Amino acid sequence: EQPGIDLILPDFTTIRDRLDDIEGIVLTHGHEDHIGGVPYLLRLKPDIPLIGSKLTLALIEAKLQEHRIRPYTLEVQEGQRERIGVFDCEFIAVNHSIPDALAVAIRTPAGMAVATGDFKMDQLPLDGRLTDLHAFARLSEEGIDLLLSDSTNAEVPGFVPP
């Protein structure tokens, strides 16, 4: 909440010299705080592929049309695995306040990282789609070297309303 400020953009200075190293952008879900800066990054390098669920890609597509950017997109679903450069990415269903959210397990030559994206542990989601705890358990047995966990309102005690 920034009164009088309509747009906050990430500072891409730290990656500007390494844009050619980017194999793709994995979008975990379609909320503005996760997709809003993508068109501005793609202005710097428009051929970076975007990877995400059907709904997430549909939401970012509307933003990209405003900027007249048409990158390559790869639609993925829960349970799917895709090779993105040297990375083997596995997509996992998570529940969030927006449908079609995904976590991603990224297997690299150096080990495995898991990025949860925003999620919540709602056992009665409106869309019936639960966070796939079995997939997370399986990945933990395989060995997770880095967990990047994000959860909206994680600091609020109790339960998050639907």
Image: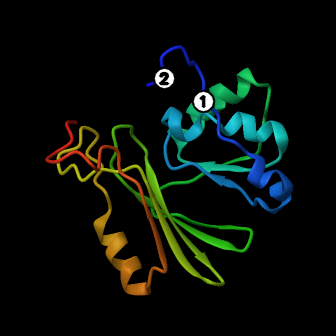
Task: Give the secondary structure at mark 1.
Answer: loop
Residue 97 location in percent, x, y? 33, 38
Image quadrant where one finds the C terminus: top left
Does 70 sit left or right of 57 as displayed?
right
User: Quadrant of residue 36 in the image?
Assistant: top right
Residue 16 location in percent, x, y? 82, 50
Which kind of residue does numbered mark 2 sit on? Gln
Residue beneath the point at 56% across and 31% down = 59
For the rendered model, the colour scheme is rainbow
Which kind of residue does numbered mark 1 sit on? Ile
The circle drawn on residue 8 is 1
Does 69 sit left or right of 26 as displayed?
right
Q: Nearer the viewer, mark 1 or mark 2?
A: 2
Which residue bears the numbered disc 2? Answer: 2
Residue 42 location in percent, x, y? 77, 40
Q: Residues within 10 Å of mark 2 (few under 14, many from 20)?
A: few
Q: Residues within 10 Å of mark 1 (few under 14, many from 20)?
A: few
Task: Give the secondary structure at mark 2.
Answer: loop
Labels 1 and 2: the sequence-earlier one: 2
**The furthest residue to the left:** 158
Circles 1 and 2 in contact, beta carbons < 8 Å: yes
For the residues labelled 1 and 2, the Cα–Cα distance comes to 9 Å
Comparing 125 with 111, the one in front is 111
The circle drawn on residue 78 is none
Residue 35 location in percent, x, y? 58, 38
